[in-house]
């Protein structure tokens, strides 16, 4: 087994080796740009880690890991266009650096490139990976549509929101892990359990992302802090605030989520104050912990050595306490 930093280095080196100066450059340069921004690369790291947890050399999992990373970044390009986001990982988004049409087309190409990495596997593995990937990619699109729909709905419930983030975020984390299990050709039970572990970890990760969107440090978060508030997104924080708020706070929250001022700083500060006053912030942090513990409970059922379980647990604990 290797450290997280080592897996990140392996992915960076493999990505570098796979990048070529293809033409037309206006299609491929934005792809190289978004992939070059790095980030934590949690999903491909999990693919490599899972392969080794089930006793297969990480090198065998590199193509699938890169497929996951390319797909994830494709979805980010298109999400940023839909959200009109100015920043991604502290840098200009693709549509800001180039234009919207370039972002759409380069994103489309990335989806195709992702599939091509599965062609490096023998037919039976390829079939399993492609089947899981297709299911996951469609679920991510469904989750994104729900996310957009929720902006204009006043009847979004906590279960609605949790289903949305499961599809938009958690299923890709889960699939990244299951791909490592498929490549290692472990038992179906192990593959399903590692998927469940990844799903709960993914839910905790997205809830943490929602929390950091409001309360993260602008210098380390890498995205515009308060972006969800500006976009009037019905996050877990918002829904818990609505649940706990007094009629007066609720009225103010509804008003704040109905306006789009030129300067959003006062709106963001006011909403964050309501999140804290109502206990929504504390409830969100509690939910992050609960989903992490649920993942750890699943971990105990997987048929692997205890030292490998310890490594996965440490990864989950590190994720739960992240600040970026």
Image: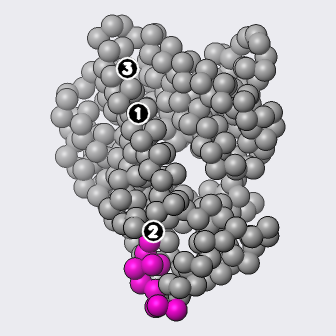
Front position among marks 1 and 2: 2
31 shown above or below 271: above
Residue highlighted by disc 1: 138
Which region is colored magenta?
Answer: 239-248
Lower position in the chain sequence, tag 1 or tag 3: 3
Tag 2 near tag 3, CB within 8 Å: no
Label 3 environment density (alpha carbons within 10 Å; few <14, some 14–19, many ≥20): some
Give coordinates of residue 307: x percent, y percent: 33, 44
Lower position in the chain sequence, tag 2 or tag 3: 3
Viewer-nearest residue: 28 or 292: 28
- Residue 229 - label: none
Q: Does residue 33 appear in this view? A: yes
Q: Does residue 282 appear in this view? A: no
Residue highlighted by disc 3: 130
Mark 1 vs mark 2, CA separation in Å: 26 Å
Mark 2 vs mark 3, CA separation in Å: 37 Å
Name the element at disc 1.
helix
Name the element at disc 2.
loop
Question: Quadrant where the C terminus lies?
Answer: bottom right
Residue highlighted by disc 2: 154
Viewer-nearest residue: 257 or 168: 257
Front position among marks 1 and 3: 1
């Amino acid at each position: 087994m290797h450290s997280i930093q080592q897996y990140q280095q392996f992915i960076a080196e493999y990505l570098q080796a796979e990048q070529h100066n293809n033409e037309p450059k206006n299609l491929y340069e934005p792809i190289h740009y978004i992939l070059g921004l790095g980030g934590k690369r949690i999903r491909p790291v999990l693919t490599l880690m899972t392969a080794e947890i089930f006793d297969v050399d990480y090198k065998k999992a590199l193509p699938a890991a890169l497929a996951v990373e390319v797909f994830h970044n494709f979805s980010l390009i298109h999400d940023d266009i839909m959200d009109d986001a100015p920043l991604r990982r502290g840098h200009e988004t693709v549509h800001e650096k180039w234009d919207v049409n370039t972002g759409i087309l380069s994103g489309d190409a990335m989806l195709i490139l992702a599939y091509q990495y599965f062609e490096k596997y023998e037919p039976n593995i390829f079939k399993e990976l492609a089947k899981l990937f297709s299911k996951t990619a469609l679920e991510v699109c469904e989750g994104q549509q729900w996310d957009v729909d929720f902006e204009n709905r006043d009847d979004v419930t906590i279960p609605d929101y949790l289903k949305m983030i499961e599809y938009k975020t958690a299923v890709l984390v889960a699939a990244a892990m299951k791909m490592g299990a498929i490549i290692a050709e472990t038992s179906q039970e192990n593959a399903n359990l590692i998927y469940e572990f990844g799903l709960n970890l993914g839910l905790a990760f997205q809830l943490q992302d929602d929390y950091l969107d409001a309360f993260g440090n602008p210098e380390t978060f890498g995205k515009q802090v308060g972006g969800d508030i500006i976009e009037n997104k019905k996050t877990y924080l918002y829904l818990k605030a609505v649940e706990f708020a007094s009629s007066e706070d609720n009225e103010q929250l509804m008003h704040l989520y109905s306006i789009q001022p030129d300067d959003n700083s006062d709106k963001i500060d006011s909403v964050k104050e309501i999140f804290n006053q109502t206990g929504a912030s504390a409830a969100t942090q509690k939910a992050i912990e609960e989903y992490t513990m649920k993942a750890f409970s699943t971990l105990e059922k997987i048929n692997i050595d205890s030292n490998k379980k310890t490594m996965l647990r440490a990864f989950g604990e590190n994720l739960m306490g992240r600040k970026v």
